[in-house]
Image (spheres, rainbow, N blue to C red):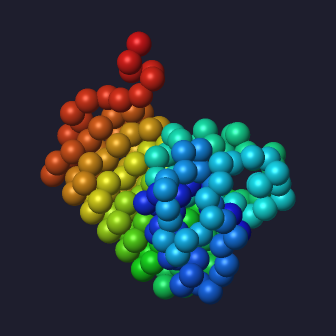
């Protein structure tokens, strides 16, 4: 197994790999840091290093993770990584490249896209749909039948009530309580959640 990325997110995923008694061959990074724990080797990415390897893109930024995916998708295979302590319903679908961190709970008939981060102790209730390249932060809680569109970020400890749609590339701030639909590119903070601005290329001219 190979990690693409050698910084904070990679350190967390490497620890997950060790906890699952799996092996990491090496890491690749476009701007390799001076060192990585346990003296693992870090290389600049090349096709030769990634060809036919099982890879996890260990990058926290949703947009960067997507860019890297499109750069390397023809070279390698993408692993699903799930910590042994996570509960994932047998009736849940999880896409390639997604990482499910410790103490996560994902209940029945959830659909999770590819290259998502489902972070520590988050809860995703029944029949939610989480599209590609989404990050659900630690201790966030999603009630049932929620749609999280591509590239959205749900912040630390945020709570979203049932039936809500979170738009493409939207950002839900830490601790926010979301009681109504959130449009694409909106940034929502507070309790109750309110839109404070819009971000992203479509809203920057």
| Image position of 180 (left or right of 118) | left
- Residue at position x 39%, y 21% from top? 203
Total marks shown come to 0
Name above or below for residue 153 compared with residue 142.
above
Quarter of the N terminus within the rendering: bottom right
Q: Which residue is drawn at 52% across and 75% down?
A: 38
Residue 165 visible to the viewer: no
Asked where in the image residue 71 lies, by quadrant, the reply is top right
Asked if 31 appears above or below 58 in the picture, the reply is above
Q: Which residue is drawn at 82% across and 51% down?
A: 48
Residue 202 higher or lower than 150, as above or below? above
Q: Can you tell which quarter of the image residue 49 is in?
A: bottom right
* Residue located farthest toward the top when viewing the structure as drawn: 205
Closest to the observer, 145 or 18: 18
* Residue 169 in sight: yes
Q: In this view, does 180 lie above or below 79?
A: above
Q: 86 or 4: which is nearer to us?
A: 4
Toward the viewer: 190 or 129? 190
In terms of image quadrants, where is residue 79? bottom right
Residue drawn at x 84%, y 59% is 52
Quick one: quadrant of the C terminus?
A: top left
> Could you say where residue 53 lies in the image, as x and y percent from the top left?
78, 62
**Where's residue 40, x and y in %?**
59, 69
The percent position of residue 159, horizontal first and vertical second, equals 28, 60
Is residue 138 left or right of 75 when viewed as pictured? left
Q: Where is residue 124 in the image (x, y as percent from the top left)?
A: 44, 67
């Amino acid at each position: 197994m190979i990690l693409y990325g050698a910084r904070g997110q990679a350190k967390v995923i490497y620890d997950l790999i060790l906890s699952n008694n799996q092996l990491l061959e090496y890491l690749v990074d476009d701007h390799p840091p001076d060192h990585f724990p346990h003296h693992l080797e870090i290389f600049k990415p090349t096709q030769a290093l990634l060809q036919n390897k099982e890879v996890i893109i260990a990058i926290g930024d949703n947009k960067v993770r997507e860019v890297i995916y499109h750069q390397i998708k023809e070279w390698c295979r993408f692993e699903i990584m799930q910590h042994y302590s996570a509960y994932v319903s047998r009736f849940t679908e999880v896409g390639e490249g997604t990482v499910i961190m410790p103490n996560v709970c994902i209940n029945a008939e959830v659909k999770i896209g590819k290259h998502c981060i489902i972070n520590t102790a988050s809860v995703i209730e029944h029949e939610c749909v989480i599209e590609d390249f989404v990050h659900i932060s630690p201790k966030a809680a999603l009630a049932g039948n929620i749609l999280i569109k591509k590239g959205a970020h749900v912040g630390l400890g945020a709570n979203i009530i049932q039936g809500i749609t979170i738009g493409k590339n939207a950002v839900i701030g830490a601790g926010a309580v979301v009681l109504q639909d959130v449009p694409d590119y909106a940034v929502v903070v507070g309790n109750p959640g309110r839109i404070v601005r819009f971000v992203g290329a479509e809203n920057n001219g």
